[in-house]
Amino acid sequence: QVQLVESGGGLVQAGGSLRLSCAASGRTFSNYAMGWFRQAPGKEREFVVGISWSGGSTYYADSVKGRFTISRDNAKNTVYLQMNSLKPEDTAVYYCAAHSSFRRVPAVAGDYDYWGQGTQVTVSS
């Protein structure tokens, strides 16, 4: 089992920044690829960004490229999501997720094994 706890969400004006954190506990964090997803009201959960177990590979949704940056610190069992130039359409509950793999970084929610409880991000116009 892996337990994931997100933090760092909040209310920010358009153009502002937030940094989300996802702290993991349980099994060896570095065995897992990590992803961030988001879900807005009335919409399906969508892939935002993923990072490989080593941090050497990252994958971004087109909607956030150039604005969001994912990173991880395996010594601290934490993955981060730096969000800059936020837009109202970024408003959603953000979830981190873990996938047990040294090779794949999935973009499909169903491929992830563990999920956090989510943190709300609200961007006002």
Image: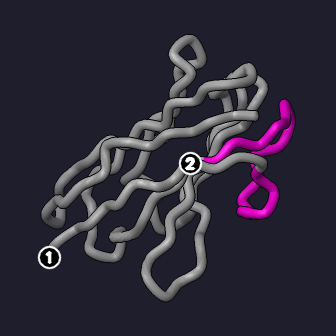
Mark 2 and mark 1: Cα distance apart in space: 28 Å
Q: Position of residue 4 (x, y in %)?
A: 57, 39
Instruction: Say left or right for 69 vs 58.
Output: left
Hey, what amino acid is under mark 1?
Ser
Q: Residues within 10 Å of mark 1 (few under 14, many from 20)?
A: few
Residue furthest to the top in view is 75
Hey, what amino acid is under mark 2?
Gly
- What residue is disc 1 on? 125
Residue nearer the viewer, 107 or 121: 121
Q: Is residue 107 magenta?
A: yes
Q: Is residue 103 magenta?
A: yes
56 in relation to 98, above or below: above
Query: What residue is shown at x 24% (from left), y 55% (from top)?
Result: 10
Q: Secondary structure at mark 1?
A: loop
Q: What span is colored magenta in the figure?
A: 97-112
Residue nearer the viewer, 27 or 71: 27
